[in-house]
Image (cartoon, rainbow, N blue to C red):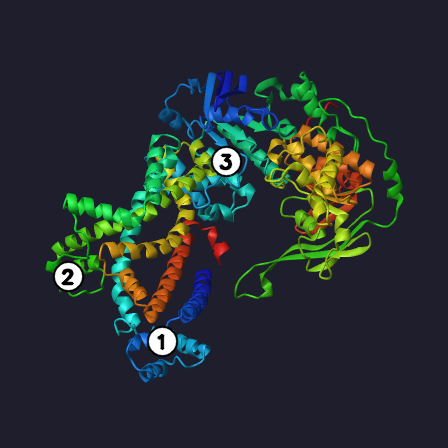
Amino acid sequence: MRPVLSIKDLTLHLQHSGKCTPVLSGITLEVMPGEIVGLVGESGSGKSITSLAVMGLLDVDGEARISGRIAVLGQDVISMAEEDFRRMRGADMAMVFQEPMTALNPIWRVGELMIDVIRTHHRKIRRNEAHSLAASLLADMHIRDVERVLQAYPFELSGGMRQRVLIALAFACHPKLLIADEPTTALDVTVQAQILSLLKEMARRHNTAVLFISHDLGVVSELCARLYVIKDGKIMEAGSTESVLLRPQSSYTKALLAALPEFSPPRQPLPINGISQISPIYHQREESRSGASSLLEVSDLHVEAKRKSMFSTRTSDTIPILKGVSLSLRPGTTLGVIGESGCGKSTLARTIVGLIRPTSGAVKFCGHQISGPGPTLSKQLRQGLQMVFQDPRSSLNPRMRVWEILTEPLLALGRISELERRQRAAVLADQVGLSKYGLDRYPHAFSGGQRQRISLGRALSTEPRLLILDEPTSALDVSIQAQILNLLLRLQDELGLSYLFISHDVSVIRHMADEVIVMRSGEVVEAGRAGQVLGSPRHPYTRQLIMAVPKVRQAS
Amino acid sequence: MRHVRLVAERIIGLCLVLLGVSAITFAISHLIPTDVARMIAGDFASEEAVAAIREELGLNRPIWSQYLIYLRGLLSGDLGVSIQTGQPVLGDLLRHLPATVELAIMALLLAVIIGVPLGVIAAVYNGRWPDHVARIFSLIGISTPSFWLGLMLVFFFYGVLGWLPAGGRMAVEHFGFPPVTGFYLIDSIIVGNFSLFLDVSLHLALPSLSLAFLLMGGFVRLIRASMLETLREDYIRTVRAAGVGHWRIIVKHALPNALVPFVTALGLSLANLLTGAVVIEAIFMWPGMGSYILDAAAALDFPAIMGFTVIAAVIYVLANFAVDLVYLRLDPAQERRLS
């Protein structure tokens, strides 16, 4: 049997303004007909570049120098004329990308776009034939109201629905090779499970070879027969999924597996680069845990969004976001908030810190009412409550130096000299493990993990008692996530902090939280001790959520 | 239904803008230290005569009452009587309006027809020679004063080559032709006079080209920038991965998206167009609003100046309303943001 995709010794250098950077070195991989093969790596490993090189879609600043061989269906695509290559794209080989929210043109109806693509490859097909072909493709994706989706603009569809449309588009001409580049990373776990089974089904039915690119070991473990592990443009390890995940040979794969929160006992530091970390002594924690009064108390919180209009004052134009959320957080502990996108978990965080005004209900912090229809948060109380956001790329001002960012919250508290600010910044940087970096630099000089340390340092600047962490590690790689989680555990121990930890990731919450609330459509469906809720869930939704999480095969 | 509400909101907005414009022009005209009554009466008129005129014009009343009278006039379409021509200002403006609108529309069309393709080509060949050519062209367009360009065009095409007329809207032999709509291109088609149509087109060529040049450079830059941004979008990668052809992607999948910000700029460039027309009309002896308002300004003809300002504001608001409607066509997701 001949491989559908065969990459031999692919090396790629980027030539940009006199500098020559190696991106890929000696990539060799094969995908057989009907086989689903995983290419696993962290960001910057070269996995996406590899897939774009196969598709001939490399679009880089400067010049890309390629050597080696990429053969699709036995044809060398590197030396192929662009027009012939274009005809292969979409017909023999297709691709599904990560971000379904932006991958569809906002001003094209779904049906029009599908017809346009179908007619690109089948010139003789009439419009109405192409239309019915598009309808049957969507029906294959288990979409029920096919005609509505064909008439819809992308903004009228959910992320999961858009990804179905994009998969249908990729299968429009029954390609022999499908490259899926993190196709479910932007989706909720329950939707992810549906999309993965869909991909599996389509690949089996059409005997399509699939190169599945992902950073998520759980996903590839459930989906792929074989794996390639890639780092810094080199294949570190290859083999059957079982052997790679159960008996990893390379130290990188071992470290990657060890960094997963699900393989460590809760609240123990995660191994970094495969090296176990010393666990902190939980002295302060145990004391404060016994304290009866709660630090944060949210009772029956309601938030409604209003549609804005010049005329309308109708009250029917309000959409409920939070429908009576209650929670209580004891000092020195972590309360995990888990739920899928749109469940209101970020609104909850924003309401607690006072960025959103609730319609009714109360938020009590240290026994004082801080949010609600009544008086606003006083400066002194606000100091004790800080927030860390999800994406450290967009939550740091690119025009401020790091020491300025770290100490900016102090400006709101009163007069402070530049010298004092710089001294404070140095202390904070030390706390979050940034001490050896120049604090006069701007955020762009720092990596994603370092930037999240900066956000954390900024939140710590006012010496808060409570941190609201809104998906603090969701934009980070597994190994970086492990570092940040360890840091959070250490800070909690050293400073006696309390966390409200919001995440969609069950294993992260299981690792970090003492208590958990599960949210769905603005309501708390289940609450309790973390081990209990996530170990033996009572509510069907919690069960569904936990079942949907792809699990890495483990040696039993 | 949502469109109805959108239109209703815009009409209310238009009324508010007009109220503001009328108040400001009224205030300015009263801040300028000239005695209108004295101007009308002439330098040698007696004090009694001047006082009589002042009484007749209502200049003795308190200022708010004068403004209310002015507003009441506005509502019934009465913009006052021009000091210079002795005719109602509204009639004067409407007589001059078609010439300017014809010139402006031609200029806008030329600027779009030349500027948009140039911008697209510059973006597609980003960094290569067609891009450099287009950018130099746009730089020249932006930095050349339109009066100088107009004079150069006259010098070259009329003076040296003798191909095109130097000014006016039509040749002497067509004078006396009774206008139907005032838009001579349309009028000549209505009456079926081909030689007149050709003559009017030739007369339009130089002034509209000079005026178009004023806008074109900006258009090229704008289209280039928004096209470059659009070509980097994920959805363009999607259709590239699906094998759709290069130019089809550019024209059908990218250009309509790139035009969205451009349409906004079109509405805003109307201000440039109107002020630019004043200069161009003076050079080419174009009997439009520009020439009229230039004369009015020189003669301190306040009713005419105020009337022009109000009319210009109406045109501006209406044009930007039209832009919003085009927006809805171009980007269906905008509807929620606008309404």
Query: Is disc 2 in the same subunit as disc 1?
Result: yes
Residue nearer the viewer, A497 or B128: B128
Residue occupying image coordinates x 43% and y 33%:
B240
Query: Is disc 3 in the same subunit as disc 2?
Result: no
Chain of the residue where label 3 is placed in the rendered structure: A
Residue occupying image coordinates x 29% and y 78%:
B41
Image quadrant containing the C terminus of chain A: top right
* Kind of residue indicated by mark 1: Ser
Q: Secondary structure at mark 3?
A: helix
| Disc 2 residue crowd, few under 14, some 14–19, many 20+, Cα 10 Å | few
* Kind of residue indicated by mark 3: Ile
Front label number (2 vs 1): 1
The location of residue A68, given as percent across then percent down, is 48, 15
Front label number (3 vs 1): 1
Q: Which residue is mark 3?
A: A167
Determine contact: label 3, label 2, CB under 8 Å. Answer: no
Cα gap from disc 3 to disc 1, whole angstroms? 62 Å
Q: Is residue A213 visible?
A: yes
Residue occupying image coordinates x 21% and y 53%:
B204
Q: Which residue is mark 2?
A: B191
Q: Secondary structure at mark 1?
A: loop
* Kind of residue indicated by mark 2: Val
Cα gap from disc 3 to disc 2, whole angstroms? 59 Å
